[in-house]
Amino acid sequence: MDVPRRRMLQIVSFAVGSAFSLDRIAAQTAAPPTVPPSPAEGSVRHGAADETKMERVMGIGGFFFRAHDPKGLGRWYQKHLGIPLTPQSYQDPVWQQDAGPTIVSPFPETSIYFGDAHKDWMLNFRVRDLDKMATQLRAAGIAVEIDPQSYPNGRFASLHDPEGNPIQLWQPGGVAAPH
């Protein structure tokens, strides 16, 4: 692996907030990843000669997915992770995320990172205190596996919602920690 690609994989590994090893990412990545613009750039430039700036999205406005029991699953997310249900009116409050990094990272169809090969997505939630959150979830009978390794960008835990969808909890640390 050449040095620039290795450095890129380190950046992607940090950005994704995952526990991947560089070799594992390299084995699952068909094409070399591209570097997204830095937040300071604020927009995407297309080519050296073309200085046209592209409008970009500001963040995630919602996450929509199918469920066998949508109401029950919504209540589970509200009760155990503190994410309120979709408001019933425009006057009701919505969940407000704390500011921080959000990663969008497509994975190869053959990735085993989500666990069940039939699951097409995984949520990664930032948390303030991973140990406290894990204790709270375990007290409710939810299996949580904390990764014993601490990474330069923080600590991680894995769990599944009642329909078997994978969830990763991330307590940012190091350079990713809130200031």
Image (cartoon, rainbow, N blue to C red):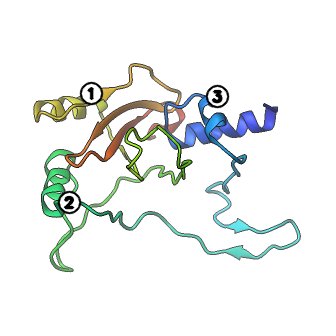
| Mark closer to the observer (1, 2) | 2
Labels 1 and 3: the sequence-earlier one: 3
Three-letter amino acid code of the residue under disc 3: Asp
Nearest to N terminus: mark 2 or mark 3: 3
The amino acid type, in three-letter code, at marker 2 is His
Residue 172 locus on image (x, y percent):
43, 36
Mark 1 crowdedness (10 Å alpha carbons): few <14, some 14-19, many ≥20: some
- Vertical placement of residue 167 versus 98, above or below: above
To which residue does mark 2 refer? 68
Closer to the eye: label 1 or 3: 3
- In the rendered image, which residue does mark 1 sit on? 131
CA distance for labels 1 and 3: 29 Å
Image vertical order of residue 137 relative to residue 81, above or below: above
State the SS at label 2.
loop
Name the residue located 33 percent from the left edge and 26 percent from the top edge: 146
| Res. 117 mark | none
Q: Residue, x 30% and y 47% (percent of image)?
A: 165
User: Height in image: 162 above or below 36?
Assistant: above
Query: What residue sits 62% from the left and 75% below the top?
Result: 55
Q: Report x, y in % for residue 25.
A: 61, 36
Residues 105 and 7: in front is 105
Label 3 sits on a secondary structure element that is helix
Sequence-earlier tag: 1 or 2: 2
What residue is disc 3 on?
Answer: 23
